Image (spheres, helix red, strand yellow):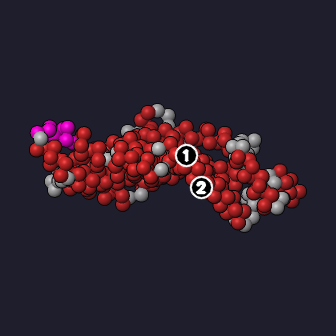
Amino acid sequence: MVRYVIEKILYMLLSLFVLASATFFLMKAIPGNPFQSEKNIPPAIQQMLMEKYGFDKPVWEQYVHYIGNLLKLDFGTSMKQQYVTVETVIKSGFAYSVQLGLLAMIVSVAAGVLLGLIAALNHRKFLDGFTIFIAVLGVSIPNFVIASALQYFFGVQLRWFNVTGLNGPLDYVLPVIALSFLPTAFIARLTRSSMLEVLSADYIKTARAKGLSGRVILVKHALRNAIMPVVTYVGPMTANIITGSVIVEQIFGIGGLGKDFVNSITNRDYTLIMGLTLFYAVILMLARLITDIAYGFIDPRIKLIRGRGGA
């Protein structure tokens, strides 16, 4: 298991290197430079800015300098926010994004598994059909539409919640619902189909024949095996929540990384774009690594197979 984790970390580092290189050269392929959008900048001052950020040097030299700074965990300074480093932007905005992301992940897993269980235990009944309807609705509607609808009905019409900002616990309700709606629906469908398959397995029938209680069969035998597809989805779900938070944070006026990322693209802030892209990539890769490690704790057979395979 230790060797497997080390290999995954090495693959992560290689992937980050490829992503950093691709992002750098894509930024260089964009016509113009970050300072051409500014109004009435004299050529002499624009030349000074180019020299300050190293844009006057050959591309290969800029690339070597950029990779060298990354190895020192130095993402550079924002080109639009004076004297503000990329690390400072990440630290100030990540606090809001991680709070929304963690809450949305908890709500998604808890609500999705619960809805999936209810649907599976009430197969072909009203609750099953209602859960399927909610799941289809959640998968079909984009989160920015849900966020706008939540703002209008619960913020503007009913005035139960504030429509912008995070000034108190209640202000988290609407953006968390908007972020968790899609993953909740997907997890509900996964749990339902997996639970129906597990409940019809032979070992479940054997457990019932032995006289075990329904709660023991459900929790100890059925749910533990049915939850595996959900664990598999946690990694992609993290990606959906993080990328989805970019739009949701903009809609609710939350000063998280989503707002910084959108502004960096609008302002052509190259260093901030590259820094935030790599930061998002690290989060997604760590989520996948944690998901893979969780397999071994949920299903010991996976750990055994990896041990025999030398991974």
Q: Amino acid at mark 1?
A: Ile
Q: Is residue 181 visible in this depiction of the protein? A: no
* Part of the protein shown in magenta: 211-218
The residue carrying mark 2 is 15
Question: Mark 1 = which residue?
Answer: 6
- The image position of residue 249, as x and y in percent, is 51, 47
In percent of width and height, residue 143 lies at: 43, 54
Looking at the magenta stretch, what is its main secondary structure?
helix
Q: Amino acid at mark 2?
A: Ser
Between discs 1 and 2, the one toward the N terminus: 1
Q: Is residue 74 left or right of residue 154?
A: right
Reply yes or no: does residue 212 show up in magenta: yes
Q: Residue at x 66, y 41 (%)?
A: 87
10 Å crowding of disc 2: few (<14), some (14-19), many (20+): some
Question: Outermost residue toward the top?
Answer: 168
Q: Position of residue 9 (x, y in %)?
A: 56, 47
Residue 20, placed above or below residue 307 = below
Query: Residue 30: where, in percent of width, then height?
Result: 70, 65
Asked if residue 14 shows in the view, the reply is yes
